[in-house]
Structure formats: C-alpha cells, structure tokens
Amino acid sequence: MSTQSTRDVRQLVAVIAIVTAVVLAILALGATLPARAQPTALAEPSTLTELPNEVRPGHDLPAQARCTYPPYGSLFIGCRILISDHVYFITYHLKRRIITRTSIAIDGETIGQLILAWGLPTGIRRAGWMSEVHWGDRSVYVGARTFSPTSRTAFISFDLEPGQTAPWTGFTNRDG
C-alpha cells in the first residue's frame, strides 16, 4: 500500500471516530433538542471558541484523559476529558504523540449565526444529512435534512491542520 493510501486510510479512520463521537453526543443531547426546534433571533455565537491549552491540537495528551482502545494497526485513539464542566473529545496520534483534533458540543447556534460572527467558511464536507463546515482549522457539524442558515450546529472541532474540503458554495441542497 502506498504512503498516500495509508495516510488516506488513517485519515478516514480518524474521521469515522469523530463522526461516531458526534452521533453519540447528538443522541445524548436529543432530549433537549425538541425544545430548541424553533429558530431564535440572531444572537452572538457560543463564547466557547477557544480551547484550554491542555487540549489544543499539537499538545501531548493530558494524563486525566480517558481513551478507548484503537482498532488494530490504527495510529489514532479517541479520548475524552472533563475540564470546567465541559467534555472535550480528543483525537490523539499515537506515533506522533500529539493531539490532532479536539471537539466539543456547542449550544446549537445556527450556521448563519456562525457565518455572521466568523465570516464566510473556507470549505465544506457533506455526507448525507451531515455537513462539516470549515473555517481553516476550525469546523462545525450540522445535521439537517435541509441545509440552510437556520440549521443548528452540534459540535465545534479544532484541527492541527485544516482538512481537505470542497470549496464553500453557499447553501445548496443537492449536488451539481
């Protein structure tokens, strides 16, 4: 297997781990989401846009992090840590011994609110009803049948390096 193919497989495993964590968190938050189903007036997005130093991508894994065993041959493990009443989900690279991604649930701001606060996204990755909207090394997950400015976000992620995405083309709901 070529180095590029191996790297692609490893990135796919990491993305699957993060998407799994996102889905589990969305299910855990499911009891509170129906109460928030109605769009609200525009407001400032979550103030949780900075990470504590110990969970920033590029840093070593904190000793208090709790991790799952990786699949055989995987270079990544998924971990979580509780800091100041916030649960952070960490992707840790075993060989490089650094955090490569940190994610946290956010309070359901809309993608439109985040665009107003952060500017136009740099890219988007779509899979079915799930969209991952990127601003450089920061991204949010949106799970919505119809992707619009009022679609609620579930997670914000911070990556060591910006991911490869399709260019941002606005709110389109079909390919082409």
Image: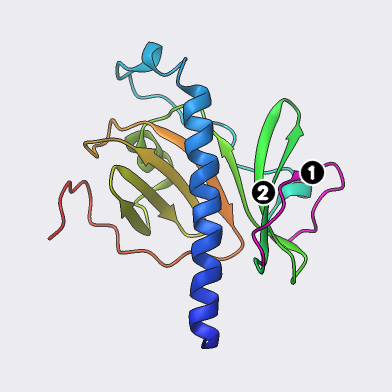
Q: Residue furthest right?
A: 63
Above or below: residue 165 compared with residue 79: below
Q: Residue furthest left?
A: 176
**Pointers 2 and 1 in contact (C-beta within 8 Å):** yes
Picture layout, residue 12 above or below residue 88: below
The relative height of residue 174 versus residue 153 in the rendered view (above or below) is below
The residue segment tinted magenta is 58-72
Please tell me in which quadrant of the rendered image residue 152 appears. Answer: top left
Residue beneath the point at 28% across and 30% down: 150
Q: Earlier in the sequence, mark 2 or mark 1?
A: 1
Question: What residue do we see at 59% from left, 35% from top?
Answer: 48
Residue holding disc 2: 90
Residue 69 falls within the magenta-colored stretch: yes
The amino acid type of the residue labelled 2 equals Ile
**Res 141 label:** none
User: Seen in the image, is 63 located left or right of residue 37?
Assistant: right
The CA span between labels 2 and 1 is 9 Å
Q: Quadrant of residue 70?
A: bottom right
Residue 27 place in picture, x, y as percent:
48, 27
Q: Please, which colouring scheme is shown?
A: rainbow
Element under disc 2: strand
Residue extending furthest bottom?
2
| Secondary structure mostly taken by the magenta-highlighted segment of the chain | loop
Q: Is residue 127 magenta?
A: no
Residue 110 at what x, y percent from top left?
36, 32
Residue identifier under label 1: 65
